[in-house]
Image (tube, rainbow, N blue to C red):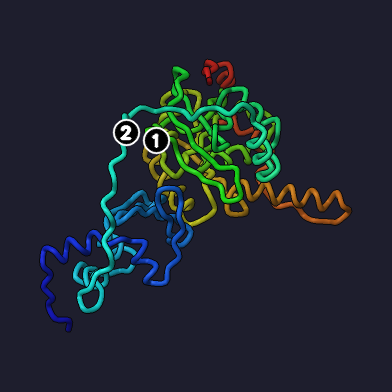
């Protein structure tokens, strides 16, 4: 039977303010820097860390150092304090005060670079995307190269054609990724079509990878990249586009993606919105695309390699038949929505 341990207000404050990176490194955990914060992996899911604060990217939950130990080390409150303060009462160093950054609340797109050379090279050569698909989004002003960091910028617009969200992806060996400050998640990277089908992905590159593999009639359908696993853009699109009747959940084939698929599918079920789940063979749709490209290259070299199974272009092109029998086609029923 464990004895009662009294903690002073100062000890509780010290434990709560424990620097989580220092704590995790002391436990032998691996922590990776990602921009102005750090990342720690909870299985396949990323946990963002800044000082004594954390946020689980897939479960969309967070808290302070005490909450972290209670959740991930399965400790109760007194046990969490003891672990954070250390044996003998000596705590790990506290997180330094976080300087407050001036934030005007205004969404501002990064400056455009004079060319798309580096982004095209990264997306086509490294990520294996189809050039015609990439170029189509460039023409729509939904994709460009930033200056001076040469990031790929994936832009999301509202119904009036105003840019409201931008997701960044670096083009170097260890690519940076993140969203432009003050982005509105309900307008993350997306494209409206005129069919009944909406395909939802975690990341813009997954979305473009899927389209690259299923080009037949792809512009008829609607697509969205959540830039995470939030469902805000999905429901915003359904509100803005009455054509959409069925949602295809295409999130990653990992713990976080599967959890999000179930969570969103449950919401859709309650709202009586038909849905189905499309799962990539590998971790995500870009890995499927790269595997398919590798298989094709090996086949052209005379080797018999069976391509990874995936949803066929024919099935995707036919997926607009969710409308009731006898009604006009979705293209006739729905206005073509403007997309900047």
- CA gap, disc 1 and disc 2: 9 Å
Residue indicated by mark 2: 103
Looking at the image, which residue is at 51% across and 34% down?
A: 224
Q: Position of residue 262 (x, y in %)?
A: 44, 49
Residue 147 picture quarter: top right
Neighbor class of circle 1 (other Cα within 10 Å; few <14, some 14-19, many 20+) is: some
Q: Is residue 93 above or below residue 148?
A: below
> Left of 70 or right of it: where is 279?
right
Badge number at residue 288: none
Local secondary structure at mark 2 = loop
Q: Out of 121 and 204, give the one closest to the viewer.
A: 121
Q: In the image, is residue 97 above or below residue 111?
A: below
Q: Earlier in the sequence, mark 1 or mark 2?
A: 2
| Screen quadrant of the N terminus | bottom left
Residue at 22% in and 64% down: 15
Q: Residue at x 28, y 65 (%)?
A: 93
Q: Position of residue 12 (x, y in %)?
A: 16, 64
Mark toward the viewer: 1 or 2: 2
Q: Are marks 1 and 2 in contact (CB under 8 Å)?
A: yes
Which residue lies under the disc numbered 1?
181
Residue with the most extreme right position: 302
Residue 112, position as x, y percentages in the image: 55, 27
Q: Residue at x 80, y 49 (%)?
A: 297
Dot 2 alpha-carbon crowd within 10 angstroms: few under 14, some 14 to 19, many 20 or more: few
Which type of secondary structure does the marked residue at label 1 adopt?
loop
Please tell me which residue lies in front, 106 or 130. Answer: 106
Q: Indicate the position of residue 202 as horizontal and vertical percent values.
A: 50, 43
Residue 208 in view: yes
Left/right placement of residue 72 relative to residue 213 reads left
Q: Residue furthest bottom?
A: 1
Q: Is residue 324 shown to the viewer in this render?
A: no
């Amino acid at each position: 039977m464990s004895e009662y341990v009294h903690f002073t207000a100062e000890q509780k404050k010290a434990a709560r303010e424990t620097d989580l990176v220092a704590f995790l490194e002391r436990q032998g955990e691996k922590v990776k820097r990602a921009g102005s914060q750090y990342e720690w992996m909870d299985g396949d899911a990323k946990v963002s860390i800044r000082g004594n604060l954390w946020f689980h990217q897939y479960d969309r939950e967070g808290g302070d150092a005490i909450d972290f130990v209670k959740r991930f080390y399965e400790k109760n409150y007194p046990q969490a304090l003891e672990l954070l303060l250390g044996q003998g009462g000596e705590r790990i160093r506290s997180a330094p005060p976080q300087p407050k950054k001036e934030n005007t609340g205004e969404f501002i797109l990064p400056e455009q670079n004079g060319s798309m050379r580096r982004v095209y090279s990264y997306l086509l050569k490294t990520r294996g995307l189809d050039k015609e698909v990439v170029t189509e989004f460039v023409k729509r002003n939904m994709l460009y190269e930033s200056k001076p960091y040469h990031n790929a910028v994936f832009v999301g617009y509202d119904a009036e054609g105003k840019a409201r969200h931008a997701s960044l992806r670096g083009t170097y060996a260890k690519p940076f990724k993140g969203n432009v400050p003050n982005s509105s998640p309900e307008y993350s990277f997306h494209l409206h079509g005129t069919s009944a089908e909406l395909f939802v992905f975690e990341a813009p590159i997954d979305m473009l990878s899927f389209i690259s593999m299923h080009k037949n009639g792809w512009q008829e359908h609607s697509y969205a990249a959540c830039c995470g696993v939030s469902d805000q853009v999905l429901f915003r699109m359904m509100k803005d586009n009455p054509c959409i009747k069925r949602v295809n959940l295409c999130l990653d084939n990992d713990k976080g993606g599967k959890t999000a698929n179930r969570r969103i599918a449950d919401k859709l079920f309650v709202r009586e919105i038909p849905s189905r789940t499309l799962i990539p063979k590998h971790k995500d749709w870009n890995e499927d695309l790269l595997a398919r490209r590798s298989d094709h290259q090996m086949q052209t070299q005379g080797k018999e390699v069976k391509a990874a199974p995936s949803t066929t272009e024919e099935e995707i092109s036919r997926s607009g038949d969710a409308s009731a029998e006898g009604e006009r086609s979705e293209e006739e029923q729905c206005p073509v929505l403007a997309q900047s």
